[in-house]
Image (cartoon, coloured by chain):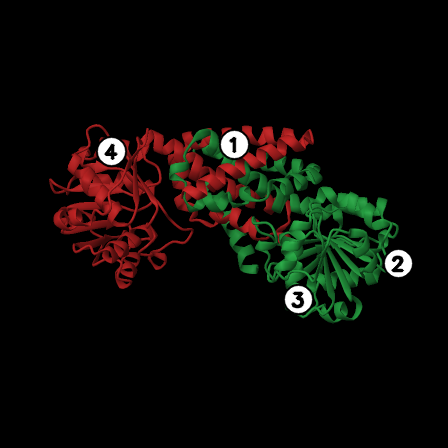
Chain colours: A green, B red
C-alpha cells in the first residue's frame, strides 16, 4: 500500500544540510528544479552538469543554476545532494561515473519516470546504495529544454518516492525535503507498484495518444480534427527519445496495461456491434462519474 | 473529395432572407447559435423550441433566444430557417412533426454529429427533402446546457455540410450562411465520407478516453494521475446520452475505426515486446511530426 507523506515544507532541512546541490541534466526538469528551489528560498549553491557545454550554459544564462560544468566527477565530489534529471538510458553510466567520486555523505536521487530498473541499477553499481532514494516527480510538459523551465513546474504535483528496507533514513529525509520544497505532495510506494501504476496512468495514455495520431495518419480526417482530438493526442507531441526510453524501461508493465486496454476495447466493440444502447450508456455514465470524482478530489 | 467553401460572411444573406429562425433544442449548441448570431449582428427573430419548458425558459432568461416555446409545429410554420440541435435520437420524430407544418420555403439544417442516418431520415420523412441540408459544426465542450453557451463557441471551427445532388441550391446558400455567420469555415463532403472521417477523428478519441478511465478504474493508479492523464481523458467527461446516441448512429464506421486502432496497438506491442528501441523511436518521431504539422496548419 502506498503511504502518503504530509509535511508543509522541507526547506529548513535543505538549507541546514545542503550547501551544494548538483543537478545532472539541465533540460526542462533539471532547470525547473533550479528555478523552483531558488524561488522557494534555497540558499545553497546549485551546480548544473551537462553532457554538452551548450545546454548547461543556456541553463546558467537563464539563471536556473549557479554554475555550469560538464565535469560530473568534480561536481559529485563537492556535493551533499545530487539529482539525476537526464534521460533514463544514461542513468547506469552516470551511477558508474559518480561511484568513484562520491563523497561519503553524498545522497543521490533521480527524476526518472520508471523505478524498478533505476533502483536495481543503483543497488548494483553504487558503493553505498542505501544513500540512493528513487523519486518520480509527476510533472512535466511536452516542451523541452531549459527555455521551457518554470519555477512552479512541480507545485501541487505528486512525487512518488521509492525508498527500500535498507535505505538510509537521513537520505530519505533529504530527498523528501527536496521535492517538498518544490511544492510537491509525497507518496511512498515500492518500485514495482510505482511502475505498474505509471504504466496504467501515464505510459498507456502516451501510447494511446500516438496510436490515435497513427490511425488518423492512415485513415484521413485531419481537416475536421478539432479540440477533442487536439487534447486527446497532446502527449503524442512529447519528446520521442525520452518516451522511447521510458517505454522500454517499463515495457513489461506497459505490455500488460496494453493487454488490459485491448480487452476493454473488445468488450466496448461488442456493445457497439450489438447496438446495445443501454449497456453503452451505463458504461459511459460510470466512467464519466469516475473521472469527475477524481477531478473533484484533485 | 471534400470541397472547401471560402466566403467571409453570410450575414447579409441571412438578414435579407431570414426574418424568423427556429432553433430546436436550446442546450449548449442551440443556445450558442442564438448568442453567436446576435453577437454577429443577426437582425431576425430567434425562436427556441424545447421539449421541456424549463430548459427553453433558461435559454430565454440568458438572452440566447428571443422567444421560448414547446410548440414545434407553430414555430416551424412561422420560420424561414430551422436548425435541429437536439440529441440525434430525436431527429426522426422531429422531422415527422415538422413535415406537416413546414411552410413551403422552410429550409432545415441540423447540428448532428453523424450524417448518413440523418440525411437518410430527412429524405424518407420530409415532404421536401431538397430543402434539408445536413451540417455538423465541429465545435463543442464537455459541458452542457444553455448556461455553458458562448457566442464564440463556433468561431474558427470547421463546419461540414453534406448537400446531395438534388439539394436546393438556395437552401445550401442559406445554411452555409448560417454557419459562416458564426465564424466557421465550411467543408463540403458526402454524408458517407463525413461519417468515416468523424469516426476516426472524433468518435474514436471519445471511446479511447473512456477506455483509459476504465483501465485506471480497474487497475488503480488514480493517486499519481497528472495533467497528461487529465487531458487525454477529457472527452470521457462529456455528456453520456449524447455520446451513446452518436456512437450508435455511427456504429459501423466506429467499429471499423476500432479495428484499425486495435491493429495499430498490436503492432506497437510487438515493438515493445521485441525491445526494438529504434523502431519505437521512429514510430514516436513520425507521429510527433504528423501531429505538430497539423497543429502548425490550424
Side (left or right) of B184 relative to B16? right
Question: Residue at coordinates 18% horizontally, 36% vertically from top-left?
Answer: B131
Pointers 2 and 1 within a single chain: no
Chain identifier of the residue bearing label 3 in the image: A
Q: Residues within 10 Å of mark 1 (few under 14, many from 20)?
A: many
How much space separates mark 3 and mark 2, taking CA atoms? Answer: 26 Å
Circle 2 sits on which residue? A104
Provide the secondary structure element on which disc 1 rests: helix
Q: Nearer the viewer, mark 4 or mark 3?
A: 3
Up-down: is B13 above or below A58? above
Q: Could you say which is closer to the camera, residue B254 or residue B189? A: B189
Provide the secondary structure element on which disc 4 rests: loop
Q: Residue furthest left?
A: B104
Q: Nearer the viewer, mark 2 or mark 1?
A: 2
Pointers 1 and 4 within a single chain: yes
Side (left or right) of A145 relative to A194? left
Up-down: is B50 above or below A212? below
Q: Residues within 10 Å of mark 3 (few under 14, many from 20)?
A: many
Circle 3 sits on which residue? A38
How much space separates mark 2 and mark 1, taking CA atoms? Answer: 53 Å
Q: Could you say which is closer to the camera, residue B9 or residue A35? A: A35
Percent position of residue B241, x then y: 41, 45
Question: Residue at coordinates 51% horizontally, 54% vertically from top-left?
Answer: A292
**Disc on res. B261:** 1
Percent position of residue A71, x then y: 77, 52
Chain identifier of the residue bearing label 4 in the image: B
Amino acid at each position: 500500500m502506498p503511504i502518503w507523506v504530509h509535511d508543509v515544507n522541507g526547506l529548513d532541512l535543505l538549507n541546514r544540510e545542503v550547501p551544494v546541490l548538483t543537478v545532472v541534466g539541465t533540460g526542462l526538469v533539471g532547470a525547473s528544479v533550479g528555478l523552483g528551489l531558488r524561488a522557494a528560498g534555497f540558499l545553497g549553491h546549485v551546480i548544473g552538469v551537462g553532457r554538452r557545454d551548450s545546454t548547461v550554459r543556456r541553463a546558467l544564462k537563464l539563471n536556473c543554476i549557479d554554475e555550469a560544468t560538464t565535469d560530473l566527477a568534480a561536481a559529485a565530489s563537492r556535493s551533499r545532494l545530487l539529482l539525476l534529471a537526464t534521460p533514463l538510458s544514461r542513468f547506469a553510466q552516470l551511477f558508474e561515473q559518480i561511484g568513484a567520486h562520491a563523497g561519503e555523505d553524498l545522497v543521490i536521487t533521480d527524476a526518472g519516470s520508471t523505478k524498478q530498473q533505476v533502483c536495481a541499477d543503483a543497488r548494483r553499481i553504487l558503493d553505498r546504495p542505501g544513500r540512493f532514494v528513487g523519486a518520480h516527480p509527476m510533472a512535466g510538459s511536452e516542451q523541452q529544454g531549459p527555455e521551457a523551465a518554470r519555477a512552479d513546474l512541480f507545485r501541487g504535483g505528486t512525487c512518488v518516492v521509492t525508498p527500500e528496507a535498507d535505505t538510509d533514513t537521513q537520505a530519505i529525509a533529504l530527498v523528501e525535503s527536496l521535492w517538498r520544497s518544490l511544492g510537491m505532495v509525497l507518496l511512498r510506494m515500492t518500485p514495482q507498484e510505482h511502475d505498474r501504476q505509471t504504466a496504467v496512468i501515464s505510459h498507456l495514455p502516451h501510447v494511446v495518444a500516438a496510436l490515435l495520431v497513427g490511425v488518423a495518419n492512415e485513415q484521413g480526417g485531419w481537416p475536421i480534427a478539432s479540440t477533442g482530438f487536439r487534447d486527446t493526442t497532446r502527449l503524442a507531441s512529447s519528446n520521442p527519445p525520452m518516451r522511447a526510453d521510458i517505454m522500454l524501461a517499463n515495457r513489461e508493465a506497459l505490455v500488460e496495461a496494453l493487454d488490459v486496454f485491448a480487452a476493454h476495447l473488445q468488450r466496448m466493440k461488442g456493445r457497439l456491434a450489438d447496438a446495445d444502447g443501454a449497456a453503452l450508456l451505463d458504461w459511459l455514465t460510470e466512467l464519466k462519474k469516475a473521472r469527475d470524482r477524481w477531478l473533484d478530489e484533485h
